[in-house]
């Protein structure tokens, strides 16, 4: 399925109010008339939107419209950059394959190969390399989820009951996907499991 110029900004977070104010009312259990509020300046709101509301995609402008193409281009750029860094450190033609994934603590977990500890050390010593692998992992999962949502929407249009049955994992919390990588003589391969 070919998809281009589809905004995915809704897949992230809701946007703050247009008047650049965020108010939160807190009702106290002992005093229901107590109201607390916070007002954020327009400069603070811009910083909040720029850093918190955007996916991790390098764009020339703001993030009001992130397309599937933007995400895929970022993934290709990150994959090429990671391959280049690992090639320069390990020499692609001379190594066996390593499996890579981002652990729950944010570290890169390396398996297989001749010296996985050496590869883990490369990621520990190069935070940008680790961050780009994490971004590639996150964006790969997001693109997969987005495409699967589009498939569900098409199937739903044809037969709602069958679509809900076929894509039940999207709704029942059993959709535990993880991005894993393999680096070897053919470069970096991305696998989505689950």
Image: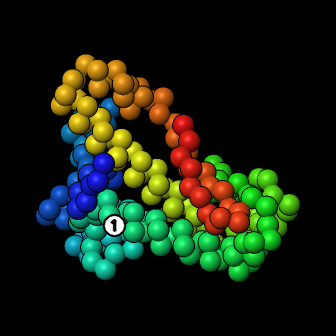
Q: Which residue lies furthest to the left in this view?
A: 19
- Residue located at (25% from left, 31% from top): 155
Task: Say whether residue 103 is visible.
Answer: yes
Q: Residue furthest right?
A: 114
Q: Which of 140 and 56 is in front in this view?
A: 140
Estimate the x, y position of residue 56 in percent, counting from the top left: 42, 65
Q: Which residue is drawn at 22% across and 23% down?
A: 160
Q: In which quarter of the image is residue 187?
A: bottom right
Q: Quadrant of the C terminus?
A: top right
Residue 9: horizontal and vertical position, in percent?
Answer: 27, 57
Q: Based on the displayed image, in which of its 4 quarters is residue 129 positioned?
A: bottom right
Using the rendered image of the protein, determine whether residue 125 is visible from the camera's viewpoint.
Answer: no
152, above or below 127, in the image: above
Residue 96's x, y, as percent? Answer: 79, 61
Q: Is residue 118 above or below residue 161?
A: below
- How many residues crowd around disc 1 within 10 Å: few (fewer than 14), some, or many (20 or more)? some
SS of the residue under disc 1: helix
Q: Position of residue 31 (x, y in %)?
A: 27, 36
- The residue to which callout 1 is attached is 70
At x 39% / y 68%, what residue is drawn? 73
Render colour scheme: rainbow
147 or 62: which is nearer to us? Answer: 147
Q: Is residue 143 left or right of residue 92?
A: left
- How many circles with numbers are drawn on the protein? 1
């Amino acid at each position: 399925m070919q998809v281009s110029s589809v905004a995915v900004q809704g897949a992230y977070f809701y946007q703050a109010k247009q008047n650049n104010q965020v108010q939160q009312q807190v009702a106290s259990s002992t005093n229901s008339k107590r109201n607390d509020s916070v007002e954020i300046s327009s400069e603070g709101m811009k910083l909040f939107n720029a850093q918190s509301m955007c996916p991790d995609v390098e764009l020339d402008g703001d993030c009001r419209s992130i397309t599937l193409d933007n995400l895929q281009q970022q993934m290709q750029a990150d994959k090429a950059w990671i391959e280049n860094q690992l090639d320069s450190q390990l020499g692609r033609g001379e190594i066996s394959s390593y499996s890579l994934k981002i652990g729950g603590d944010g570290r890169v977990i390396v398996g297989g190969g001749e010296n996985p500890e050496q590869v883990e050390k490369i990621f520990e010593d190069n935070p940008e390399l680790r961050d780009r692998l994490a971004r590639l992992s996150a964006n790969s999962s997001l693109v997969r989820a987005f495409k699967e949502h589009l498939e569900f929407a098409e199937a739903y249009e044809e037969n709602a009951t069958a679509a809900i049955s076929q894509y039940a994992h999207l709704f029942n919390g059993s959709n535990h996907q993880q991005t894993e990588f393999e680096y070897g003589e053919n470069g970096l391969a991305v696998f989505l499991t689950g």
